[in-house]
Each structure stands twice: as structure tokens, then as C-alpha cells.
Image: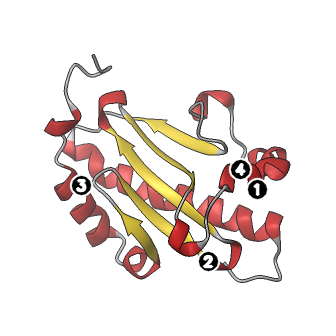
Amino acid sequence: MSRTGRSAAEFRHHSFWALFDERHPDERARRARRGPWFWQRGLPAFEVVITMYVAPEQNVVGVFFGRNERLGAVQVGQRLEPYRAAFENRLSLRPEQSADGLGVNSIWRVNCYAEDNWPAMADWLVTEATRFERAVAEILGAGRQA
């Protein structure tokens, strides 16, 4: 059973991502891939994607470095592991802000089913993804354009 007692099928993901797109239209041009539970911002110069996701059953939204073969974002966890401490330091991540098994990531525990939370969720995802993007540029090389 989920933490919320509700199923993910009850979450109106199409409506959430429509609101996300409406609030952050610049993300559309940067989108590498989208699914019912995630939106990926591509950083092709670094062969990295930043995945923004919603996990309604866990009352979590989050950001992590994802996988996207088309952009060359493969074995991202392995490639970024040597820089993990630098990312965690630069992003000021605390253990309670991260989910196990996702590498460098940031989560926010929030009631995803409450639609009045959706604007704040969308804004937080974009803000956090932008922090991750800046960290990539600073840590992996300012000489390359994100």
C-alpha cells in the first residue's frame, strides 16, 4: 500500500504536466523526453539529462540525473560517481532530502494529490533542476555549454 492510501492512477498526471508546461514554457524547448511521471531536461554537451518526476503514492516530487540513450546519457550514475561529493556539497543536499538508489538527487515531500500544491511543485522542480544544471556546468566544466 502507498503512503497516501491512494493509487498513482488517481493522480491526474496529464493535468499536472499541462500546468507545469503552462507555468514554465521555456522547459518545452529544453525537453529531452517526457512520460506520465517525469520530464527530462537535456544537457547534451555533458551527455546528461536532469529528470524531474512526480511519485504521488510516496508524496514526493524530485530531481535526479537520469538516463536517455538518444542524448548519450548512459551510465550516468557511474560517470558522475567520482563527482558525487562535489555535487552534494554544491547543492547543499542533506540525507533527508534524497531518495536511496537514485544517485545524486533531491526530493520534496508534498501531497501530490492536492491540486492547490501543483503550482509550487512545478516551480520547485524547475528551480531544483536549474540548481542541478548550474552544478553540472561548474563541476564538469565551465568550458562546455549546458
Instruction: Look at mark 4 in the image and give the residue it sits on.
Output: 91
Q: Of the residues tagged 1 and 4, which is closer to the observer?
A: 1
**Which residue is found at the position 30% from the left and 69% from the top?**
21
In primary-sequence order, the first of circles 3 and 1 is: 3
Q: Could you tell me residue 99's position as x and y percent?
A: 56, 33
Element at label 2: helix
Quadrant hosting residue 145: bottom right
Element at label 4: loop
Residue 67 in the image: above or below residue 28: above
| Residue 99 marker | none
Instruction: Look at mark 3 in the image and give the residue it sits on.
Output: 16
Residue 89 falls left or right of residue 101 = right
Q: Of the residues tagged 3 and 2, which is closer to the observer?
A: 2
- Give the spatial CA distance, label 3 vs label 1: 32 Å
- Give the spatial CA distance, label 4 vs label 3: 26 Å
**Which residue is found at the position 75% from the left and 45% from the top?**
88
Q: Amino acid at mark 2?
A: Pro
Mark 4, other Cα within 10 Å: few <14 / some 14–19 / many ≥20: some
- Give the spatial CA distance, label 2 vs label 1: 15 Å
In primary-sequence order, the first of circles 2 and 1 is: 2
Instruction: Look at mark 1 in the image and give the residue it sits on.
Output: 79
**Which residue is found at the position 37% from the left and 71% from the top?**
24
In primary-sequence order, the first of circles 1 and 4 is: 1
Element at label 1: helix
Residue 80 falls left or right of residue 65 = right
Instruction: Look at mark 2 in the image and give the residue it sits on.
Output: 44
- Residues marked 2 and 1 touching at CB (< 8 Å): no
